[in-house]
Amino acid sequence: MIGIILEIQLLNAISIEDYSPFKNEKELLLSPNMKFLVTSDMNKDEVNSVYIIKLCQQKFDKETFVF
């Protein structure tokens, strides 16, 4: 089975670790309508059988409506 990992560089997010049943993971809550820029080609990690895509959060622009 092959999966996809999104490696995201964030400007802001809210931690939900205290509310999560997965205590070994650092979970974050993202706001709706966030915009991201793909910053790398899709790379395959042969060892773990996953593709890795790197994204970077873009600053919120009040002039742009996203839906």
Image: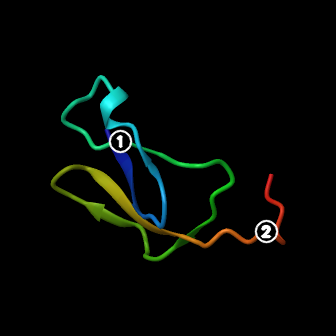
Q: Is residue 67 left or right of residue 6?
A: right
**Is residue 48 or residue 27 the one in the foreground?**
27
Residue 4 image position (x, y, % from top left): 39, 50
**Is residue 13 or residue 44 the one in the foreground?**
13
Which badge, 1 or 2, is on the more N-terminal residue? 1
Corner quadrant of residue 63: bottom right
Q: Which colour scheme is used?
A: rainbow
User: What's the distance in space between the residues labelled 1 and 2, CA to CA?
Assistant: 27 Å
Q: What residue type is labelled 1?
A: Glu
| Residue at the image position 15 percent from the left and 54 percent from the top | 47
Residue 9 image position (x, y, % from top left): 41, 67
Any mark on residue 27, and which?
1
Crowding around mark 2 (Cα neighbors within 10 Å: few <14, some 14 to 19, many 20+) is: few
Q: Mark 2 points at which residue?
A: 62
| SS for callout 2 | loop
**Is residue 45 or residue 14 the one in the foreground?**
14
Residue 62 image position (x, y, % from top left): 79, 68
**Is residue 55 or residue 45 the one in the foreground?**
55
| Residue at the image position 43 percent from the left and 76 percent from the top | 40
Q: Is residue 61 left or right of residue 3?
A: right
User: What is the residue that sits farthest to the left in this orientation?
Assistant: 47
Crowding around mark 1 (Cα neighbors within 10 Å: few <14, some 14 to 19, many 20+) is: some
- Asked if residue 14 is positioned above or below residue 24 in the image, the reply reads below
